[in-house]
Amino acid sequence: MKANDVRVMTPDQLEDELVKLKKEQFNLRFQKATGQLENTSRVRVVRRDIARIHTVLRQKRTAENA
């Protein structure tokens, strides 16, 4: 997911995407713990996407209040 893709989303869409990514992150952690995780790089990508969404949400909220 690119930063530009995230920036064009509405805050509601960002919240939905955040919930989806957190569920995926949980499932990946569970797979890692049970030794079933095949694509280990996906953990890093999901973590960064979550951080990217948090950053854009914070920017949009501060822009609303300013």
Image: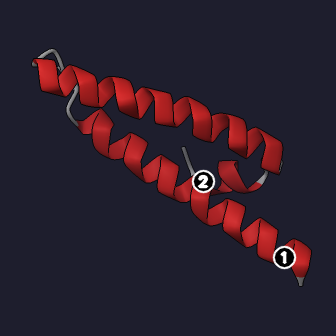
| Label disc, if present, on residue 27 of the rendered structure | none
* Percent of width and height locating residue 41: 24, 37
10 Å crowding of disc 2: few (<14), some (14-19), many (20+)? many
Quadrant where the image shows the N terminus = top right
* Percent of width and height locating residue 34: 13, 18
* Percent of width and height locating residue 7: 73, 57
What SS does tag 1 mark? helix
Cα–Cα gap, marks 1 and 2: 15 Å
Quadrant where the image shows the C terminus = bottom right
At x 60%, y 35%, the residue is 19
The amino acid type of the residue labelled 2 equals: Ile
At x 59%, y 58%, the residue is 54
The quadrant in which residue 55 appears is bottom right
Location of residue 17 with respect to 47 vertically, above or below: above
In this rendering, position of residue 31 left or right of residue 55: left
What SS does tag 2 mark? helix
Q: Earlier in the sequence, mark 1 or mark 2?
A: 2
Location of residue 42 with respect to 6 vertically, above or below: above
In this rendering, position of residue 10 left or right of residue 48: right
Q: Nearer the viewer, residue 62 or 49?
A: 62
Location of residue 62 with respect to 9 vertically, above or below: below
In this rendering, position of residue 26 left or right of residue 4: left
Residue receiving disc 2: 53
Q: Nearer the viewer, residue 30 or 60?
A: 30
At x 51%, y 35%, the residue is 21
In this rendering, position of residue 45 left or right of residue 15: left
Residue receiving disc 1: 63
10 Å crowding of disc 1: few (<14), some (14-19), many (20+)? few
